Structure formats: structure tokens, C-alpha cells
Image: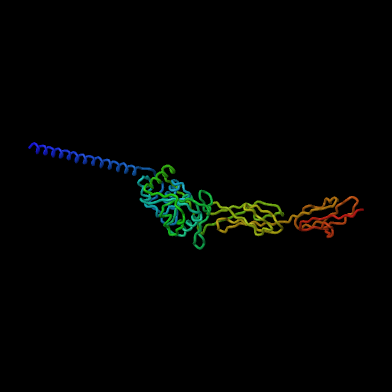
Amino acid sequence: MKGWKKIVLSAALIGAWAMIVVYGMEYMGSVNTEAAQTKQEEDKDRLTKKSGRSEVDLSRPLFQEKADPLAIFVADAFLWSTKADVAFVSQTDIKAGIDKGSITKSDLKKVLGKNREMCKVNIKGRKILTALQSNVDGNGTFLQTAGITYEVWEKQDGSKEIRHVKIDGRNLDETAEYTIVGMKETLFLRQDGVFEDGYVVESAELEDAYVMLYEYLMEALNGEITEESLQPGIRFISKDSKTIVSISEKQKELYQEDSYQLHAEVETDSGEIGVKWSSSNSRVAAVSKDGKVVGIGPGTAWITAEAKDGSGATATCRITVTGKYKIRYVCNGGENHVANPEVYIGSTVVQLKKPKKEDATFLGWYVDEACTIPITEVQGKNVTIYAAWQDR
């Protein structure tokens, strides 16, 4: 019986310990559940806490060919965070909008969605041009950009052309390599396939993409999205837009070898642009790329200033060049007459005067050094003449 009693006591003891373990597990489970609930509440509080503000209604992405404010905000954030040269964001990259007013981290977290990949790609400038042109031609959803500016010109036939492309304020170099950033599916799954031969230099899952948007909002925009912070890098120029070129002079007279500076101004919807200078007859008047005109030979030429926006707008100046000629006198020991000019203008007929020389008789002026071809007057040309003498 003593042995049985010992067994019973042992079983009772085991049961007690089992009860303790069960209650302990229940208690720990309760503690863990409470901790998890606390963390969820903290996360919810963190995500729903006001983080910034938008003065602009970003709740409705614009699925059409125009500047989309929310996509611009995302592209600007990509560029700011990654330090790439250009950011591309498709309107289909946007999964949720942002209402006007207070912004929370939860709002930002919904913008790009989950489980998506972002990448940086190195690619040639000419491919960027192709992408922009393909963009306005309607091949794929419209891309919003950051870090790049350009104009879309509508032609009379309704087609569109990309012009005046600049990256970081400098003209795009088609042969240079640039780093672009965007969603992987946007860059590599587009219908035009323009980025397919680029190579990825960095990629990352966008599990916490909202952090990028949040940091850009708080640090770069000081917590507030405004109209001014959403400036698009694209300008649309309609076929009805007017370009007017004006020039500083409508007509000008120049002497041969003289110069004159012309100036031109352009009024256009495409912003500040320059002009291209040209001459209708460079044998009469030549013009530099800056508008400086030089008289080359007698005659008339038209100097044209053409707007560089491709509109065909021009202004012209009529240049009349009058010949200016030189006479070189070889007096062969004599003294030239004071009335003989070294320079004469245009069609003036210069009657040559006699030089003088002691103990010699002047035989005449000649156009050759051997003094076999006489000349008494000069008109319309540069010439060297020689004096012939006979000793007395």
C-alpha cells in the first residue's frame, strides 16, 4: 500500500504541475496577445497619425495625356530619394489617390501598393527621346517625369513632336548615358519596349515604398503638397500657337568689310527660345550664329532670323553692301600725288593723278610691274599700280 500511495502522490504532483504549465501557457498567450494588440494599435496610430497636408486634390489620377499631379508627386519623390537623373512614373503605377487635406502614412502606403519592384537603369539619351516620343504617340499609358523638361508640339496634321528636351537644365545628349528610375513593370513591360536594352544598376522591393514618399513630403516639401510643388516638366504646344520673330533692323547699308550687329526677339507659347541666323547670299553678306553681319562683296542679301521652335516663324533684314576697294601705289622712287586715294567706294571712277620725281619724267601708271599695260583710271576693284619714269 505504501508503494501505491507513493504512486498516487506522484500522479497528483504531476497533475498539479500540468495545471501550472497550462495556466502558465494561457497566461503567456494572453500576454503575447495583449502585446500584439498593443503593437497593432501603435502601428495603426502611427499610420493614421497626421503626417502632412495637401492643398491639392490628388484623389483622382488623370488617365489621359496631361500632367497628373499625383504621378508628378511620386516621380519627384523617386528622383529625390534615389538621386537618379530622370524618374518615370506611369499613371497605372498609382494604386490609390490622396484626398485634399490631412495626409497620414496610411494614405501614402496605399499610393503604390505592395510587393512591387522599383529599379534604376542606365540608358542612352537617344532611348529617352524615343520613350518620350512613344509616350505622346500613345504607346502605353502616359508617363509622368521628374528631372527632365520637354515640349510636345502638335503639327498641322495632328501628329506630335518632342522638342527642347533638357535634363537638369542642360540639353539632352543623345550619346550620353543617364540613370533613370521607375517601377520595373513600367520600364520593362511597356508596349514600345524602348528600355529593354538598358541595364539595371539597382533594384529593390517596394514593401516600404511609402517611406520614400513620406520622407520626400516631410523633408523636401516641409510636410505640405502645394500647386507650386507639382509643376510638370512637360509643355503642350497646340498647332494654333503663334510664334512671332522681330528683328532690330529691316534694312541696312554696309560697306565691304564693315560689320553690323543685328538682334532678334521671339514671342512664342513655348517659352524662351533662340533664333537661327542665315544669309541668302554669303558672297555679299555673311552672318554669324550670334547675328553679326559682315559685308563681303557688293550687292544685296537678305539676313534671316528663324525661330528655333520649328514653327517656321522668321524675320528678315535687307543688307545692301557697297564695295570698298583699295589702290596700292608703287611709285618706284617717286612721290605720289596727294589726291590719289588709297581707298575708294562703290562705283566711283578714280582718275589717277601724276606722281613726281626729281630729274625724271613720269611716263604713266601701269598694272604690271614691267610697265607694259597702262592704266589711267580705276573703278570697282582692288588694284596695284606701278609708276614708270624716264630720267632727264
Q: Position of residue 280 (x, y in %)?
A: 65, 59
Horizontally, residue 88 falls left or right of residue 351, namely left
Q: Is residue 175 visible?
A: yes
- Colour treatment of the image: rainbow
Q: Which image quadrant for residue 64?
A: bottom left
Q: Position of residue 199 (x, y in %)?
A: 46, 53
Q: Nearer the viewer, residue 356 or 153?
A: 356
Q: Position of residue 52 (x, y in %)?
A: 39, 43
The N terminus - image quarter: top left
Q: Which image quadrant for residue 301?
A: bottom right
Q: Position of residue 98 (x, y in %)?
A: 38, 49
Name the residue furthest bottom.
Answer: 157
Name the residue furthest front.
Answer: 3
Q: Is residue 72 visible?
A: no
Name the residue furthest right.
Answer: 392
Q: Nearer the viewer, residue 27 or 44?
A: 27
Q: Nearer the viewer, residue 111 or 39?
A: 39
Horizontally, residue 319 falls left or right of residue 71, namely right
